[in-house]
Amino acid sequence: VLTILVAIICLPFLATAQWSAPINLSPAAHSAGLNESMGSCLGVSGDTIHVIWCDKHTSTHSALYYSRSVDTGLTWSAPINITDTSSNDWNPAIAVNGNNVHVVWRYIDPVSGKRSSWYKHSIDGGNTWAANILLDTAIADWPAVAVSGNIVYVANDYVTSQMPYNTEIFFLRSTDNGLTWSPHQQLSFAVNRSEDEAITAQGSHVHMSWNDKRSGQFQIFYKESADYGVTWGPDLMVTPQYDYSTMVSVDGAHVDVVSAGSTSGNHYQILLNQSADTGATWAAPMNITTDTLNTFFYPDMVRNGNDLHVVCGGSNGAKYMHSADGGTTWDVPYSFTGNSTFVAYTGCAVHIIYVDALHKIRYMRNPTANSGHCGTTVGINNKEEVGIKTIVYPNPFASQTTIEISSSEKMENLILKVYNIVGQEIMSKNFGTDNKIVIGKEKLTSGIYFYKIIEKEKVISIGKLVAQ
């Protein structure tokens, strides 16, 4: 019988010990590459993980390749090229909502060098792909993409002047899941370069951050739309020093902007800006690397409640950084060899992709790193693999939480047992006929607890509860 001690592996201070060995997703690649940090090449929905990359076949030919995992990264499909290998396609980005997979990229004409943005869509989770759609005919750099429901958002930057050189941020959207697109809307109006925009969306809110040189040095600017991208708020400078390579993440009212920055322009560190009111006001940037001997670049970040996950490249290798308290304190970073890193989460697990020294796309997973949000846990005899699924929502919780368990086989007489941090049993309760239990805060004081679910004297699931 599985004991409650097994659940202790989910504690945050052991999270870095759980990373899997890297998996090569692109074994046949000639010279594979990902995007810069402004457009993620990693998308998730449920237990399915989607990865997009480009592979340079010759100096003038590059195609986009795609692979997915439907079991939270345990196994992967063989990569397929979703654009023609005779084309010249670079810098892809991906956004996923259910079975809808949206990909954008930059095409470079091998003769003229002119750059344009393209879009491609799968409505069946990556099994089949529609035809390419040209998004612009201007001189445009690589686009970024986000999705919320059936609305797809794309942002890119155009060269609006060669002498003096100037770029501006433009935006377009599709309200019918990528079938048709609005005209481009210019969002920045400043002298000098505005470029490398990152975009994300949740509900009616669309958030964007970008590199901006209107002051004479690069800074990070941000703007937000509260009405699905119809109208936009003002440009807000959120990071004032020498900055570059930004990403934006949203989780409810929390908006986080991560970038590489330096007060002197040397030894760039990873800086984090945070807003707790949907981008209206911003705290001062915090340095989350604090390592002036090394330089860090191209960060990516995702938030899930108070769990913050950040990855970046660096002069001394790539790093993964985790905070379990919204960014107040940070665990010891996990270092690995790679570059161009991206991060995402599904339930308990955190996922990373990166480019290795041989220009292959590598993937790693940590099944416990998202420790405050353990939705699916592994029971004895790998019950998860045959259909056991436990969902705890919300977790952490302030007033009450619901524990729900399902299986591909019939379950009955399920018992929930809850233990405190030292292993003392403090609650034992039978599940209802719908295999759900609601636990009120009056039963638990603030703290960390572990649970196990028992069927016929066998433990079929373990997990963690956080009462706030």
Image: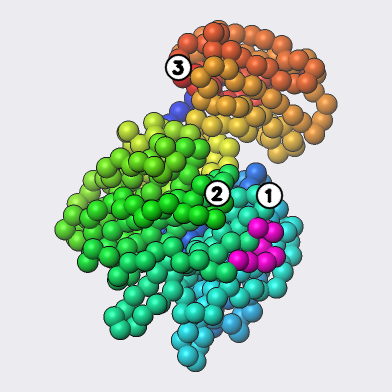
Count neighbours of disc 2 (C-alpha within 10 A) and say few if under 14, some if 14 to 19, many if 20 or more: few
**Mark earlier in primary sequence (2, 1):** 1
Q: Which residue lies furthest to the bottom in this view?
A: 111
Residue corresponding to mark 1: 98
Q: Which residue is pictured at 70% across the width and 53% down the height?
A: 99
What range of the chain is rendered magenta? 175-182
| 130 horizontally vs 86: left or right | right
Q: Residue 447 carries which label?
A: 3
Q: Which residue lies furthest to the front in this view?
A: 231
In the figure, 185 relative to 70: above or below? below
**Mark earlier in primary sequence (2, 3):** 2
SS of the residue under disc 3: strand
Q: Residue furthest right?
A: 410
Count neighbours of disc 1 (C-alpha within 10 A) and say few if under 14, some if 14 to 19, many if 20 or more: few
SS of the residue under disc 1: loop
Q: Position of residue 401 (x, y in %)?
A: 59, 20
Residue corresponding to mark 2: 227
Q: Which residue is pictured at 54% across the width and 16% down the height?
A: 399
Q: Which amino acid does label 3 sit on?
A: Gly
Residue 6 shows up from this direction:
no
In the figure, 411 relative to 381: above or below? above
SS of the residue under disc 2: loop
Q: Which amino acid does label 2 sit on?
A: Asp
Mark 3–mark 1 CB contact (< 8 Å): no
**Mark earlier in primary sequence (3, 1):** 1
Give me the C-alpha separation between circle 2 and circle 3. 38 Å
